[in-house]
Amino acid sequence: MGKRILYVLLSALLLSIPWLGGPSITLFVGFIPLLLLQEERPKRYWIYVMSTFLLWWAITTWWVAIAAVIGIVAAFSVGTALNTCAFMLYDYVLRKSTKPLAYTVFVTAWISYEYLFTIGDVSFPWLNLGQGFANSVKLIQWYEYTGMFGGTLWVLIVNLLIFNALKQWRNIRKWIIPAFAVVAPIIWSLTIYYKYREPDAEAKITIVQPNFDPYNEKFNTDPAQLDKIMAQLIMEAPDDVDMIVLPETAIDGVSEGEHINSHPSITIFRNIIQAKYPNAAVITGASSQKIYPSPEQASITARTSRNGIIYDFFNSALYIDTTTDIQIHHKSILVVGAEKMPFYKITKMFDFLTVNLGGITGQLGVDTVRTVFHSVNGMTTGTAICYESLYGAYFGEFIKNGAQLMFVITNDGWWGNTTGHRNHFSYSRLRAIETRRSIARSANTGISGFINQRGDVIQKLGWDQRGTITDNIHLNDKITFYVKYGDVIARVSGYILALSILYFVSYIFRKKHHMEK
C-alpha cells in the first residue's frame, strides 16, 4: 500500500514541477509511476489514478480558490474526471486487447480530453501538457507548426517509450528510440530558434502597470484619483511612442454608443494624446455596457433593468486616439464562475453565483469576431483579454484578421502573489511562438512585459510594482502554419480515437465469437 501511494505522489509531483517553476523535462516521466503501478494490477486502480490527477490539480491551481471557489470546484471536478476517464479508457483497452492499440488510445484519448477542455463550455486548459513548456521556449519553437498540442503529443509518446525501455533498462539498444524522440525535436527547435530573424518593421510601445489592489483599492477608490495616477503613468511614455497599453478593466462604467466619448477617463486619455502624443493611441481595458433597442436585437446574455432597459455588460478593450472613433473588442472566452455560468441557456437562473472580478457580477456578453485595431499610421494590432491568452487557436484568429503584433491585458491581482500570475505570463511566450507575433503584456499588478517572436522575454516589470516600461518591438505580417490550420493534431486525434474504439469493439466481438466456436 505504501509503495502505491508513493507512486501516486511521485507522478503528481513530476507532472506539477513545470507549473511550480521547475524544469519542463519532468513531464517526460510524469506518467511512468502510474504506468508502473498499472502493471501491478491493484484493485480499484481508478482510485489511484483519480488521486494522482486530483493532487496534480490541487498542487498547481489551488490559488484559483482565493477569488472564486466555484471556479476551482469546476476546474478540479471536470479536469480530474476527464483526466481519469482518458487514462482508465487506456487501462481498459490494455487489459482486453493489444499494446499498440492501447497506446494509441492513451495518446489520442488524452489529447482529445485536452481539446474538449479547451473548446468546451467548461474550459480551463491551464494544465494542458503542452502548456508546461512555457518557460522552455528554446525546446518548442516548432509550436509554430503544431501549437501546444504538439507538446502534449511529444510528452505522451516519450513517456510510453521510456516506460517500455525501463522494462529492459540494461539493454542500451532499448534506449535509442526514446533518446531520439527526446533529442530530435529539441535539435529541430534549436535550429529554428537560432535561425529565426524578426522582420525589420518596429513599433514603440509603452506598457503601464498601475498596481491597484483589486480587493482594497481598484473598486473602492474615487475614480478621479485612479484616473490621476493613470494619467501620470501615461505621460511617462516617450514623445515618439506609437501605442500605450493599459491593463484589463483599467476604466469602469463605459457606455457604448453616442455617449462613449463623454466618459471622464476616455476624455482624460484623449486630452493627453492630443497634447503630447498626436500620432499615438491608448489601448485600455474597460468594463463596458451596451444597450439594445429591442428584445429581438438582444443577446442571450442580455439583462433587463427594472425600468425595462435591455443591456449587456462586457469585459472590453478600447482603442483611443485623437479622433472620436473608438474601436472596441469584447472578451469572448470567459472564466467559469467569475464571468459566466456554463451552459447558460440552462443555468441562467443561477447567474447570482458568479463572483465579482472586475466590477461586474453575473454573466458577461461576448464578441463573435476577434476585432483588430487599426491605427492612423496603418499598424494593426490584436488585444487578448486575460484568460484569452491561454487559447492558441483563438489567439491566432486575431492574426488571421490582420494583427501585426499582439497585446495581452490582464488583472492577475485577484490571485495574489502565487504561481498563478507567473504561469499566466509565461503562456504568452507560447502564443508568441505559435503566431510569430511580438507581444506587449500589461498586467494591473504584474507581471507586465515584452516578448519577442521567439518567445524570449525582452523586458518585464515584476509583481506588485507601479510603473511603465517602453521598448521597440517588431511587427510581422506572415501567417504561421499553426495560425492557418489551427489545432490539427487535436482534431485528428479525435478521429483516430473514434476509429480505435470501433476497432477495439470489433476486436472484442471477433475474439468472443472465436471463443464460442
Image: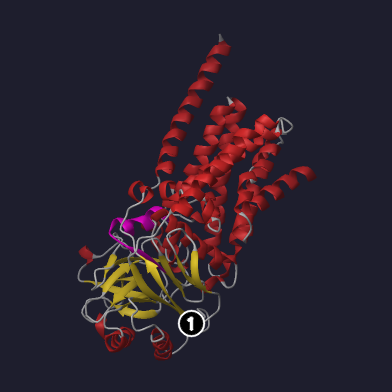
Indicate the quadrant containing the C terminus: top left, top right, bottom left or bottom right. top right
Amino acid type, callout 1: Gly
Rendered image quadrant of residue 281: bottom left
Image quadrant assignment for residue 246: bottom left
Per the image, is 468 magenta?
no
Q: Position of residue 207 (x, y in %)?
A: 42, 76
Q: Residues within 10 Å of mark 1 (few under 14, many from 20)?
A: some
The residue at 45%/54% (across/down) is: 122
Residue 94, above or below 421: above
**Residue at figure coordinates x 60%, y 68% from the top left:** 418
Viewer-nearest residue: 437 or 212:
437
Q: Residue furthest top?
A: 517
Given residues 340 and 206, the one toward you in this image is 206
Is residue 237 rendered to the left or right of residue 107? Answer: left
Q: Position of residue 201 (x, y in %)?
A: 32, 65
Look at the image and name its color scheme.
secondary structure
Q: Is residue 88 left or right of residue 302?
A: right
Asked if residue 392 is among those painted magenta in the image, a careful observer would answer: yes
> Eyeballing the image, is 295 above or below 480?
below
Q: Which range of residues does the magenta coloring cover?
A: 391-408
Q: At which x and y percent is residue 202?
A: 34, 68
Mark 1 lies on residue: 467
In the rendered view of the protein, which quadrant contains the N terminus? top right
Element assignment for label 1:
strand
The correct choice, above or below, for 210 with respect to 476 in the image is: below
Q: Residue 511, position in %: x, y?
A: 55, 17
